[in-house]
Image (cartoon, helix red, strand yellow):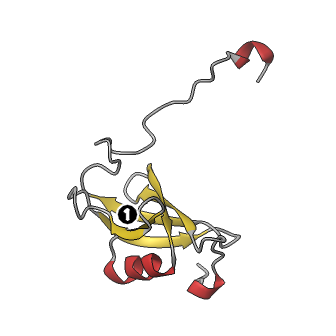
Amino acid sequence: METVALDDLTFDERGLIPAVVQDAENGDVLMVGWMNRESLDRTFDEKRTVFWSRSRQELWRKGDTSGHVQHVEEIRVDCDGDVLLVRVHQVGAACHTGERSCFFRIFSSTTDRRSEGV
């Protein structure tokens, strides 16, 4: 597998890159967070996920307050170098609501599009 260096990644205008967090054991998508260079470096070094909070404008380590830790197995990079896939071993819930995954809800449009062929 090809390796990618930090300088080869494409961060957005805020210096951030999206990180899709996936359960390494079953492939479930657990959550999506944002990383900057420092949080990505820390994640790689500590083998635990560290994200950038866009609302608080600070770094946060997953599980520091909840105990629901993500142990990093591997970090992959998409073909364009602008999205990360962080494969983890999840301890406890990944979602702040207490759900195992943040993707526990199903989208339902206010209009039933099935009759429109969509």
Q: Is residue 89 above or below residue 80?
A: above
Q: Is residue 41 above or below residue 81?
A: below
Residue 49 visible to the viewer? no
Q: How many marks?
A: 1
SS state under label 1: strand
What amino acid is labelled 1 in the image?
A: Val
Q: Is residue 10 left or right of residue 40?
A: right
Residue 115 visible to the viewer? yes
* Residue of label 1: 88
* Residue under the point 65% across and 84% down: 8
Q: Position of residue 110 (x, y in %)?
A: 63, 19
Along the viewing direction, whichever of 18 and 30 lies nearer the viewer: 18
In what quadrant of the picture does the C terminus appear? top right
In what quadrant of the picture does the N terminus appear? bottom right
- Of all residues shown, which one is farthest toward the top? 115
Q: Position of residue 82 (x, y in %)?
A: 65, 69
- Of all residues shown, which one is farthest toward the front? 56
Q: Position of residue 109 (x, y in %)?
A: 63, 23
Q: Is residue 3 left or right of residue 114?
A: left
